[in-house]
């Protein structure tokens, strides 16, 4: 059963993307549908005229021949024009579909959908479906209509010569249509079934060719192992597709044989009819052309219907992505987010990532007062990163609530809330962009060039053509200085305009000119921190392991800089290194999703609880290292 709404959505997308191309294709389809019938009729008339069976003058014969030649030129030329218009149509639809799909993904306010493997499978198929399915449905519908015109035209001529042949040809098409539609459904189901294997195949392929895992893969000798796994997935995909291809080959071979038998029987009848004087030579020519034309048109229509059916089944994934409901409860009339003046409060917050998962947070009550620094410590898996996700409203609590100056988080505008938050995440991104852009991503107004501060560009900060950042360079440089990375960036071959990636150095000359520079882990960490300094005016600052990639000296320097950033600001500081949190206004110890202790450093050490035990363990590690002659590392983890 065809889903009419799905058809309407696909055709609507195709028509909205390029209305002129759509109208042109409709007109060309009519021409292509009528042309074969016209050629067949003109051929009959020319043959009969040459045989002298219709008494036409020589001038009339020449006129028919000219008309036949013109029709032949059209038959040869119109398909090429259709191909050009079709290519333009496809490009327009691909652009519109991709824009709509990524806009839909960007509208998802939280992270739950992106962490859902089923949604990932839909997303994996949606990009291609959005580009190809609308044209396959709309263009396939036009091809079916074109074939219908051809069938009607030839059927009219066949009805005069042999009415029964029309019925035979139509009935012969029924099993073909049934088989083709069934094969299209099976092919679509196979693509969905194989989607997880395809994702695993691409996962291993990316591991083997990407930079992120290159060091470990080579050091640990993982290349052969991951290569075998990649090829195992690929062999499984190939085997499944091969079985499907063989099934299609067997079915289509049988259908082709049946079509040939019908055509052969029709030819035998035409020859017998001509011998009996019931058909003229021109009639035989037209009859043969009509039978071949009807079979070809019906076959084309059936194939197109099958492709349309398959495209619709594929298009479901695209529509699923576009129609996916928000993964957060979005208020119909969200309240604007006021400047923070009191603080953020978590009330009896429980959270888990799904009904079948364990609780990550269990009844957390916590206040982050305005203008104060709250430090969150705990072992891995205690729930610290989850709490950060809740504060940034990537998720909502399963139970309980978060409040911003007493206002329920769910009632606030999500975009407005996040605009008031600055953060450095433990798993920060290293973008394949310039150094300046890697900092500017901390503020979209700077990245798109709309933040104007009137600062003169520093030396070495010229930008390549196409990069629009100069208006915000003053803020970028200031943020880099505060993060302690300005000197390192300024020393790069092209300063802040240096590309921090080797993926886009198209030529060795461009690479030698300063493209393709890779930073150290510590430099990347400081560059990511510069993004937070770019958002230093935000109401809430979240620092999640801000110095995990730095050596002891760099860490001490950075935390001195962070103290100036945190001064008078509402801050949540997360760290395994207890030496970095001891000067926080309030320290919270989280274990197994529950707050087990809270207070200031001196009070928690005096209490002799979990915090004191962890702090003593770290301090002992420092003393032991110092006793052995090794430098004490104040950056030891829990």
Image (spheres, rainbow, N blue to C red):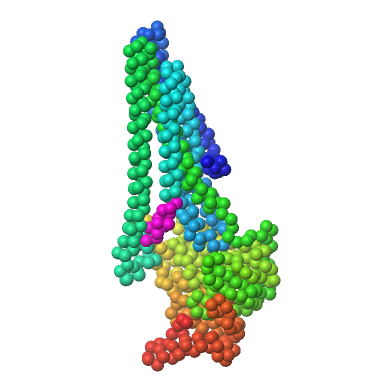
Q: Is residue 228 above or below residue 386?
A: above
Report the side of 273 relative to 431 (left or right). Answer: left
| Start-end of magenta stretch | 192-204
Task: Reply yes or no: does residue 459 show up in magenta.
Answer: no
Q: Residue at x 56, y 62 (%)?
A: 110
Q: Is residue 532 among the parts visible in the rendering?
A: no
Q: Name the foreground residue: 184 vs 608.
A: 184
Coordinates of residue 509 in the picture (x, y in percent): 34, 58
Q: Name the foreground residue: 456 vs 29.
A: 29
Q: Residue at x 59, y 89 (%)?
A: 603
Q: Residue at x 62, y 69 (%)?
A: 399
Coordinates of residue 125 in the picture (x, y in percent): 46, 51
Q: Residue at x 53, y 41 (%)?
A: 2
Magenta stretch: dominant secondary structure? helix
Q: Is residue 131 above or below residue 444?
A: above
Coordinates of residue 360 in the picture (x, y in percent): 54, 72
Coordinates of residue 609 in the picture (x, y in percent): 55, 88
Q: Quadrant of residue 213?
A: bottom left
Report the side of 35 relative to 584 (left or right). Answer: left
Q: Quadrant of residue 625?
A: bottom left
Q: Is residue 319 above or below residue 620?
A: above
Q: Is residue 419 among the parts visible in the rendering?
A: yes
Q: How many marks?
A: 0
Task: Reply yes or no: does residue 193 show up in magenta.
Answer: yes
Residue at the limit of the structure toward the bottom, as seen here: 627
Report the side of 4 relative to 71 (left or right). Answer: right
């Amino acid at each position: 059963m065809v889903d009419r709404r799905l058809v309407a959505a696909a055709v609507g997308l195709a028509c909205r993307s390029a209305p002129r191309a759509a109208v042109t294709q409709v007109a060309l389809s009519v021409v292509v549908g009528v042309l074969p019938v016209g050629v067949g009729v003109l051929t009959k008339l020319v043959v009969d005229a040459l045989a002298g069976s219709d008494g036409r003058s020589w001038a009339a014969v020449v006129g028919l021949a000219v008309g036949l030649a013109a029709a032949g030129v059209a038959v040869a030329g119109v398909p090429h024009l259709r191909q050009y218009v079709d290519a333009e149509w496809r490009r327009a639809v691909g652009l519109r579909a991709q824009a709509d799909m990524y806009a839909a993904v960007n509208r998802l306010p939280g992270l739950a959908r992106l962490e859902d493997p089923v949604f990932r499978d839909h997303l994996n198929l949606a990009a291609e479906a959005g580009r190809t399915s609308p044209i396959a449905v709309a263009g396939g519908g036009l091809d079916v209509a074109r074939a219908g015109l051809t069938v009607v035209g030839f059927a009219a001529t066949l009805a005069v010569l042999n009415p029964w042949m029309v019925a035979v040809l139509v009935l012969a098409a029924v099993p073909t249509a049934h088989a083709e539609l069934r094969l299209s459904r099976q092919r679509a189901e196979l693509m969905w079934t194989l989607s997880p294997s395809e994702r695993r195949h691409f996962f291993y392929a990316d591991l083997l060719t990407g930079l992120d895992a290159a060091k470990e893969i080579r050091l640990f000798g993982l290349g052969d192992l991951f290569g075998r796994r990649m090829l195992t997935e690929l062999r499984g995909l190939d085997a499944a597709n091969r079985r499907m291809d063989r099934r299609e080959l067997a079915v289509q071979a049988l259908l082709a044989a049946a079509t040939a038998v019908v055509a052969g029987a029709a030819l035998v009848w035409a020859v017998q009819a001509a011998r009996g004087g019931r058909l003229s030579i021109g009639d035989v020519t037209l009859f043969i052309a009509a039978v071949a034309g009807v079979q070809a048109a019906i076959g084309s229509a059936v194939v197109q219907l099958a492709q349309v059916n398959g495209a619709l089944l594929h298009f479901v994934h695209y529509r699923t992505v576009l129609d996916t409901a928000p993964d957060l409860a979005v208020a119909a009339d969200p309240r604007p987010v006021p400047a923070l003046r009191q603080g953020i409060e978590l009330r009896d917050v429980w959270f888990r990532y799904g009904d079948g998962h364990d609780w990550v947070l269990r009844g957390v009550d916590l206040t982050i007062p305005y203008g104060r620094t709250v430090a969150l410590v705990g072992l891995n898996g205690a729930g610290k990163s989850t709490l950060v996700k809740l504060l940034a409203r990537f998720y909502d609590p399963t139970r309980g609530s978060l409040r911003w100056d007493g206002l329920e988080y769910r009632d606030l505008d999500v975009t407005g809330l996040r605009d008031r938050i600055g953060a450095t995440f433990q798993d920060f991104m290293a973008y394949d962009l310039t150094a300046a852009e890697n900092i500017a991503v901390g503020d979209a107004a700077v990245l798109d060039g709309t933040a104007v501060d009137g600062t003169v560009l520093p030396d070495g900060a010229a930008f390549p053509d196409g990069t629009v950042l100069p208006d915000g360079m003053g803020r970028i440089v200031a943020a880099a200085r505060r993060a302690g990375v300005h000197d390192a960036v300024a020393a790069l071959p092209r300063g802040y305009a240096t590309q921090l990636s080797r993926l886009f150095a198209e030529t060795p000359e461009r690479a030698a000119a300063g493209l393709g520079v890779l930073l150290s882990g510590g430099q990347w960490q400081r560059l990511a921190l510069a993004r937070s300094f770019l958002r230093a005016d935000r109401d809430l600052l979240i620092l999640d392991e801000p110095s995990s990639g730095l050596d002891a000296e760099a860490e001490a320097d950075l935390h001195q800089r962070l103290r100036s950033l945190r001064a008078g600001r509402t801050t949540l500081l997360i760290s395994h290194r207890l030496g970095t949190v001891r000067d926080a206004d309030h320290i919270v110890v989280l274990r197994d999703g529950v707050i087990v202790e809270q207070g200031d450093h001196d009070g928690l050490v005096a209490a002799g609880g979990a915090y004191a035990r962890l702090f003593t363990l770290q301090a002992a590690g420092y003393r032991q290292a110092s006793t052995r002659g090794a430098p004490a590392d104040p950056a030891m983890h829990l």
